[in-house]
C-alpha cells in the first residue's frame, strides 16, 4: 500500500479544474483534451471540450423542428413560433370546417360528418316544381278515381 502511495505522489497530480488524477507527464495533453475552450456550434459561446456535449444538449440556440411546419429554428424562438404556426388553419376536406394546426390531429381522430351540399336557388326552384307536379298528379288521380 505504501508503494502505491509513493507512486501516486511521484507520478500523478490532482487537476485543479476537474479534480481527476492525471499523470504529471500528461499535464499538457490533459489540459488540451479536456480544458481547452471550443465554441459551441449553435451559440458560439466558448465551452470546455469536456462540457461541450452537455452544453449542446441544453443550448438555447440548439435547433428544434416545428411540430406543424417542420421548420428548424433555434430553441429560444420555438415557443413563439409554435404559438403562431399552430394557430394557422386548414380546411377539412370532409366537414369543410377550418381547423387550427394545433387541433388538426384531434379533429382527424373524431368522426367527421360531411356537410351536405348547399341548396342553390336553381335546385330549390326545381324542387318546388317537382312538388307542384306531384300535387297536380295526386289531384288528377283523385278526380279520375271518382
Image: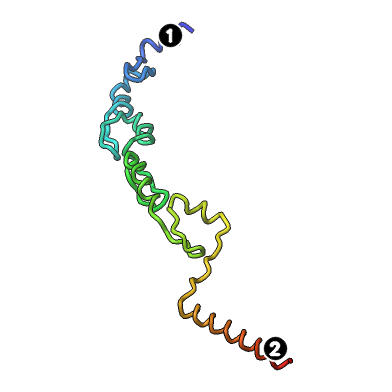
**Residue located 33% across and 46% down the image:** 73
Picture quadrant of residue 145:
bottom right
Picture quadrant of residue 132:
bottom right
Q: Residue furthest right?
A: 146
Q: Residue furthest bottom?
A: 144
Expressed as whole percent of the image width and height from the top left, the position of residue 95 reads 51, 63
Q: Which residue is mark 1?
A: 5
Look at the picture and state if 5 lies above or below 68. Answer: above
**Residue located 37% across and 34% down the image:** 58
Expressed as whole percent of the image width and height from the top left, the position of residue 101 reads 43, 53
Earlier-in-chain disc, 1 versus 2: 1
**Residue 42, numbered label:** none
Dot 1 alpha-carbon crowd within 10 angstroms: few under 14, some 14 to 19, many 20 or more: few
Marks 1/2 in contact by CB < 8 Å: the verdict is: no
Pick the quarter of the image with the C terminus: bottom right
Dot 2 alpha-carbon crowd within 10 angstroms: few under 14, some 14 to 19, many 20 or more: few
Q: CA distance from mark 1 to mark 2?
A: 122 Å
**Residue located 37% across and 10% down the image:** 9
Expressed as whole percent of the image width and height from the top left, the position of residue 48 reads 30, 28
| Of the two numbered discs 1 and 2 in the rendering, the one whose residue sits closer to the viewer | 2
Q: Secondary structure at mark 2?
A: helix
Look at the picture and state if 31 lies above or below 134. Answer: above
Picture quadrant of residue 46:
top left
Judge by depth and name the residue closer to the eye, 116 or 60: 116
**Residue located 53% across and 69% down the image:** 116
**Residue 142, numbered label:** 2
Expressed as whole percent of the image width and height from the top left, the position of residue 102 reads 44, 49
Amino acid at each position: 500500500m505504501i508503494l502505491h502511495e509513493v507512486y501516486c505522489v511521484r507520478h500523478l497530480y490532482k487537476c485543479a479544474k476537474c479534480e481527476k488524477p492525471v499523470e504529471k507527464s500528461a499535464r499538457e495533453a490533459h489540459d488540451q483534451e479536456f480544458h481547452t475552450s471550443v465554441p459551441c456550434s449553435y451559440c458560439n459561446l466558448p465551452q470546455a471540450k469536456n462540457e461541450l456535449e452537455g452544453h449542446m444538449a441544453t443550448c438555447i440556440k440548439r435547433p428544434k423542428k416545428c411540430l406543424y411546419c417542420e421548420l428548424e429554428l433555434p430553441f429560444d424562438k420555438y415557443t413563439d413560433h409554435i404559438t403562431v404556426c399552430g394557430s394557422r388553419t386548414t380546411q377539412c376536406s370532409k366537414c369543410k370546417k377550418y381547423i387550427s394546426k394545433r387541433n388538426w390531429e384531434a379533429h382527424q381522430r373524431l368522426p367527421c360528418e360531411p356537410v351536405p351540399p348547399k341548396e342553390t336557388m336553381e335546385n330549390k326552384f326545381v324542387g318546388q316544381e317537382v312538388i307542384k307536379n306531384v300535387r297536380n298528379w295526386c289531384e288528377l288521380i283523385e278526380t279520375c278515381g271518382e
